[in-house]
Image (cartoon, grey):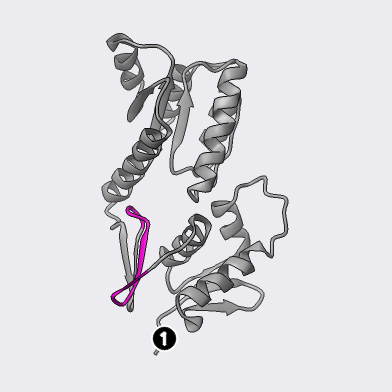
Amino acid sequence: MEDEKRLAVSLAKGLTAEGYAVDVVHDGLEGLHRAGEGTYDLVILDIMLPGLNGYRVCAALRAAGHDVPILMLTAKDGEYDEAEGLDTGADDYLTKPFSYVVLVARVKALLRRRAQGAGASPVHVHGDLKVDTAARRVFLGEREVTLTAKEFAVLEQLVVRAGQVVSKAEILEHVWDFAYEGDPNIVEVYVSALRRKLRAGLIRTVRGAGYRLEVER
């Protein structure tokens, strides 16, 4: 199982670098518990899990009514395995060894499909600011603004709730992860960077509460 653990950790590092907040568990029962109580946008599930295999975790989540997109990973090959994975309710299936680039493409496709299925547009227009969460591109007027993965993730949290106050704790939880133990002022650093790259008045600090994305008058 050491290979699976190493794979999970390396995937988590890669996805974190893409701007996603990632939690990793190495046991099927714990994974089922975490996925069942957490508000996750996507679950990547290895079939080779101790405690409870991936098929059973997936089936249990679906039986409990959870509709979170599930991407199954397996070292096996063959139509039967794929059919079994999809029959238990998985949305997509990837056989190891696989390209990291392919994994990221599948993750983005599943997240895009989920957003569109929920009736949400992946493009958020806010005054002259346009944020495409599927393509991960940002425009201010006609100008495209280049953001780092973390800057984009912070902006995304603000733009999907434009006009509402988003707390620093909420941004930390979604952009970093539940176990982040660094300086919570890291959020201020990224908000400052966004103000420099976009426009100072676009993100308002609501003292003691958080940040709000607003249209300048």
- How many discs appear? 1
Comparing 108 with 84, the one in front is: 108
Quick check: 26 left or right of 182? Answer: left
From the top left corner, tell me how far across and down residue 141 is, in percent. 31, 77
Residue located 41% across and 86% down the image = 216
Residue located 43% across and 18% down the image = 74
Comparing 19 with 52, the one in front is: 19
Comparing 99 with 135, the one in front is: 99
Residue to which mark 1 is pinned:
216
Look at the image and tell me in which quarter the N terminus lies: top right
Query: Which amino acid type corresponds to the residue marked 1 in the rendered image?
Result: Glu
Q: Secondary structure at mark 1?
A: loop
Look at the image and tell me in which quarter the C terminus lies: bottom left
From the top left corner, tell me how far across and down residue 148 is, in percent. 49, 59
User: Would you say residue 136 sits in the magenta stretch?
Assistant: yes
Segment colored magenta? 133-144
Within 10 Å of the Cα at label 1, are there few (<14), some (14-19), or many (20+) other Cα atoms? few
Query: Compared with residue 144, is residue 96 higher up or lower down, i.e. above or below?
Result: above
> Does any portion of residue 33 appear in the rendered image?
no
**Farthest residue toward the bottom?**
217
User: Would you say residue 18 sits in the magenta stretch?
Assistant: no
Quick check: 101 left or right of 121? Answer: right
